[in-house]
Amino acid sequence: MTTSQERRRRCPACGHRLPQPLPERCPLCDFQVSEEVVTAEDRTPYALSERYGRKAWWATWRWLWGAGRERLGHLGLMRSSSASRRFARVVLARFAAVLTLCALALAGWHAVTPTSLEEAINPGGPSGRGWLPVARAPEELAPRLAAHGGVAALWWNPAQALVGATIVLVTVLVLGKLMSCSLRRGVERSLGRRHRGQMRLSAALEYAAAWSVPLIPAALVLALLPLCRVAAVADWMVQPGAAVVYVPAGALAALGVLAWWFGVARLALTVPVAARRRVFLFSVIWFPLGCAVVLAGVVLGWLSLRDRLVPLLGLQW
């Protein structure tokens, strides 16, 4: 019995405690545990539930978040399957939908800041079309707003928000697909000639989307930011500050990014030793840095495109 077999006490696919001496196949799930070879056998909860017509999205999420070294090693040997590709598409679709909702809630706002008492009492209206008044400061606050500054009225343009949300939806879907393909191809090239074409990590990188799931609630929390602004302008009894939104949203976003980064780093350590350093450097350093640069350019491009479309459609303030 080899040293790796002596260390193994549980099946990497289902977690069943294995008897000793180590059998060739797991007695519970029938997964072959005797050899570490690249396999097309997808034993994730998502693939197994798909086979029996059941849904196991959250089960797969828990399966990946609780994965140990042996389970990740098994995952790294699995080739891309219909289940892994569908799982990645589902995560991307949900993330795109939530980001679109977030853009719809955050875009299209205009705050009227008065410079005199008359403007504080009667804030001016828009010259463009589609604007709706959402909140207005009470008249008794007009002297304070004129003297010390502040927002006298909030307006929202649903059409302008829809333009921004549409751009976000298309961008997230296209960029998500491109980033996934770039990561998979980069890892494949980093494996070297000896292991290139074996499709190592191909399924693992698709299931790795589960580690980025906290980004979804982060975007949902961020979509609540306009309520804080409305409460402050309308002088509600309860006025939660922007920190109430930014702190949990930032914490969830950081958790999603760091969890994905750390998970991919652990996956990179499961490849053969000869290619481990190249795969690790690409997936953990160069690819995230490239994504950061691309995302910064995409955000600037999105803002520029929105600023050009709004006047063309007559939706300016």
Image (spheres, rainbow, N blue to C red):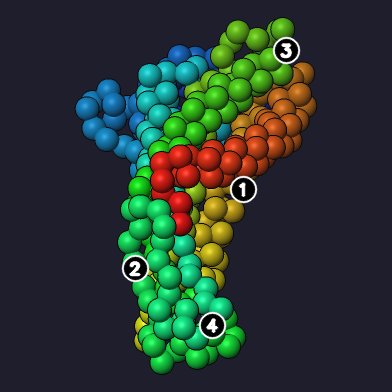
Quarter location, residue 109: bottom left
Closer to the camera: disc 1 or disc 2? 2
Within 10 Å of disc 4 (Cα), the crowding (few <14, some 14-19, many 20+) is some
Q: Position of residue 24 (x, y in %)?
A: 47, 18
Q: In the rendered image, is residue 284 in sight? A: no
Does residue 203 sit above or below 94 in this rendering? above
The disc at residue 5 is none
Q: Amino acid at mark 4?
A: Ser
Could you give the CA–CA distance between mark 4 and mark 2, rounded to whole angstroms? Answer: 21 Å
Within 10 Å of disc 2 (Cα), the crowding (few <14, some 14-19, many 20+) is some
Within 10 Å of disc 1 (Cα), the crowding (few <14, some 14-19, many 20+) is some
Q: Position of residue 92 (x, y in %)?
A: 43, 35
Closer to the camera: disc 3 or disc 4? 4
Quarter location, residue 167: top left
Marks 2 and 3, the one that precedes in the sequence? 2
Residue pointed to by mark 1: 258
Closer to the camera: disc 4 or disc 1? 4
Residue pointed to by mark 2: 134
Residue pointed to by mark 4: 116
Q: Amino acid at mark 3?
A: Gly
Within 10 Å of disc 3 (Cα), the crowding (few <14, some 14-19, many 20+) is some
Residue at position x 58%, y 41% in the image:
304
Could you give the CA–CA distance between mark 1 and mark 3, rounded to whole angstroms? Answer: 27 Å
Marks 4 and 2, the one that precedes in the sequence? 4
Could you give the CA–CA distance between mark 3 and mark 4, rounded to whole angstroms? Answer: 69 Å
Q: Position of residue 305 (x, y in %)?
A: 54, 38
Could you give the CA–CA distance between mark 2 and mark 3, rounded to whole angstroms? Answer: 59 Å
Q: Position of residue 152 (x, y in %)?
A: 45, 77
Residue pointed to by mark 3: 192
Quarter location, residue 224: bottom left
Q: Amino acid at mark 2?
A: Val
